[in-house]
């Protein structure tokens, strides 16, 4: 069931044909709260947004969000139970973990682990989005 009224910025077929390389599509309960998280906490650029679908850019990486209701007749729908993303880290390299943590605190998002320098040469934070996906903004530490 689509909630969008009017025309999208391009057709689904045009957008689909434009994709290449590795892609991420996250299913979310509602687009608006997820877009707000990506914009305010992870500093994403919103390429397109409507109640059904959004395209976000994190640096040079582009990703999609689809609202659950757009998958109402899709086999994956049966797996949408409880928290999502368990066991999956979605990493945003060269993204300030301290700024992301501060924005997450302001927005009252769950901080699984605060920004910390790790032995593998990265400073990183673990932040949970409204749908339970775990985002890890990180940046290299000083050598």
Image: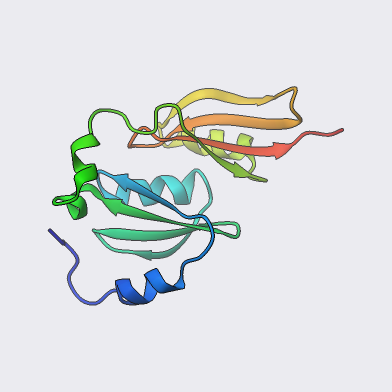
Q: Return the residue nearer the eye: 29 or 115.
A: 29
In the rendered image, is residue 62 in sight? yes
The residue under the point 33% across, 37% down is 131
Q: How many marks?
A: 0
In the rendered image, is residue 9 in sight? no
x and y percent of residue 5 in the render?
17, 70
The residue under the point 46% across, 51% down is 39
x and y percent of residue 100 in the render?
56, 39
51 horizontally vs 39: left or right: left
| Rendered view: 137 above or below 83 | below
The residue under the point 25% across, 48% down is 30
Colour pattern of the rendering: rainbow
| Rendered view: 113 above or below 17 | above
Quarter holding residue 101 = top right
x and y percent of residue 11 in the render?
30, 76
The residue under the point 45% across, 27% down is 87
Q: Quadrant of the C terminus?
A: top right
Quarter holding residue 91 = top right
**Residue furthest right as drawn:** 143
x and y percent of residue 141 in the render?
78, 33
Q: Return the residue nearer the eye: 103 or 65.
A: 65
69 horizontally vs 61: left or right: left
| Rendered view: 102 above or below 54 | above
39 horizontally vs 92: left or right: left
Quarter holding residue 99 = top right
Q: Quadrant of the N terminus?
A: bottom left
């Amino acid at each position: 069931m689509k909630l969008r009224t009017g025309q999208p910025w391009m057709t689904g077929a045009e957008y689909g044909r434009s994709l290449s390389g590795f892609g991420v599509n996250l299913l979310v309960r509602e687009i608006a709260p997820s877009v707000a998280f990506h914009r305010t906490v992870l500093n994403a650029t919103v390429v397109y947004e409507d109640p059904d679908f959004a395209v976000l850019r994190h640096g040079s990486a582009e990703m999609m969000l689809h609202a659950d209701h757009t998958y109402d007749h899709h086999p994956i729908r049966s797996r949408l139970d409880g928290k999502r993303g368990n066991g999956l880290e979605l990493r945003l390299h060269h993204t300030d973990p301290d700024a992301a943590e501060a924005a997450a605190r302001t927005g009252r998002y769950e901080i699984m682990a605060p920004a910390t320098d790790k032995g593998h040469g990265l400073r990183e934070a673990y932040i949970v989005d409204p749908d339970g996906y775990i985002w890890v903004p990180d940046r290299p530490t000083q050598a």
